[in-house]
Every structure is written in structure tokens, then in C-alpha cells.
Image: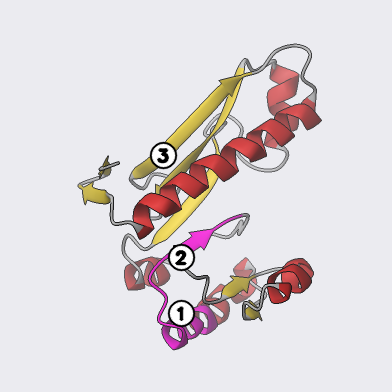
Amino acid sequence: MTEIDVVVINHDDAREVVESFGIPFKYIPATKDIRQEAEAWQLQVLKDYDIDVIILARYMQILTPTFVAENPYHIINIHHLLLPVFIGARPYERAYQRGVKWIGATSHYVTNDFNEGPIIEQDSEHVNHRDDADDLKKKGRLIERRVLARAVKWRLEDHILVHENRTIIFN
């Protein structure tokens, strides 16, 4: 079991839910225009709370090399498995239009190579012509949650060994 010490987020819409659990909430706007200032503030919060693991979920910003260097193999990201084919906005809509046959998610450590860090966990499932874009998005987000939960669990239990750009999972 672990505790969430703080939630640092770049959009304010989750404040009420987070604070209802008694978890400190830090809203730090982050855009490419103020990236360095936002990251300096984020790094200070991480130090203030002595944070060991950083989970990116819907952060949608590229971290600077400085931020990544300050947290080697401590940042876990999650994204849909439709990359690199469907990069950018509305990937499930574009996947639906192309008639994809499976969807999924990847969880990985963040490195300075965009979405190419050591993979921790992946999962997928088949979809078919009965699934519309909303169905794909719902199913994809459920897979993302499962994949992220397993990755975080293994990290917290020290079940991950990183070697070069690969992970070895002891589970």
C-alpha cells in the first residue's frame, strides 16, 4: 500500500475530487510558453513532498531534458497504443475512421526520447465494426487504467529493473 502525497496538475478541474480524499492539490498551469517556469515550480513541489514516483496522466506536455534529468526512471507515462500512427488530437476518432481492429495502451518510463522510454506494461483488445469512436475511447481508457495501475504497482513494489532501454519485470 502506498499513499499519494500530492497531486500536481496542469488543469484545475480535479481539485474537488482530489481534496475530498484529503490529498494536497497543486494547480500549476503548464504550456509550452511557460514550460520552464512551470517545471521549476513542479520540481520544487516534488522536493517539498520528497516524491519518489511521478505519474503522468493526460499531462499532454513535453517535459524538458532538465526535468527528466532530475527524475531519471521516476516518471511513468501512459498513452494509447495507437501511436505512432495516430499522433495528436482525436486519435480514437481517426482510428475509427481507419477501421482499426485493436486498441490498447502502453506505460513506460519517460526519457528525453519522446514516448520511447523503457516500456513497463502494455495491453490491448480487439474491436470491431460495431464499435464507434466513443466505444473505442471508452475501451481504450479502461485499458490505459489497467496498464497504468500495473506499472505503478510494480514500480512501488520494486519489481522493475531497467537495463538499457528495456525493463525486466519481476512479478
Percent x, y for residue 140?
A: 64, 34
Dot 2: what SS?
A: strand
What amino acid is labelled 1 in the image? Leu
Percent x, y for residue 78?
A: 52, 47
Q: Is residue 152 left or right of residue 86?
A: left
Is residue 40 visible in the rendered image? The answer is: yes
Q: Quadrant of the N terminus?
A: bottom left
Q: Distance between the residues labelled 1 and 3?
A: 25 Å
Q: Residue, x 50% and y 60% (percent of image)?
A: 55
Q: In which quarter of the image is the C terminus?
A: top left
Tag 3 or tag 1, which sits nearer the N-term?
A: 1
Which residue is most to the left?
163
Would you call the spot at circle 1 few (<14 residues within 10 Å), some (14-19), or many (20 or more)?
A: some
What amino acid is labelled 3 in the image? Glu
The residue that disc 3 covers is 121
Percent x, y for residue 27?
A: 67, 78
Between residues 33 and 107, which one lies in front from this camera angle?
107
Tag 3 or tag 2, which sits nearer the N-term?
A: 2
Q: Residue, x 54% and y 41% (percent of image)?
A: 146
Of the numbered discs in the image, which one, if any, rests on residue 54? 2
Q: In this view, does 16 lie to the left or right of 118?
A: right
Say which quarter of the image contains residue 80. Answer: top right
Would you call the spot at circle 3 few (<14 residues within 10 Å), some (14-19), or many (20 or more)?
A: many
Q: Residue, x 54% and y 33% (percent of image)?
A: 81
Do tag 1 and tag 2 residues touch (Cβ < 8 Å)?
Answer: yes
Dot 1: what SS?
A: helix
Dot 3: what SS?
A: strand
Q: What stretch is highlighted in magenta?
A: 41-57
Percent x, y for residue 138?
A: 73, 35
Q: In the displayed structure, would residue 144 be above or below residue 48?
A: above
Q: How is the image coloured?
A: secondary structure
Between residues 12 and 171, which one lies in front from this camera angle?
171
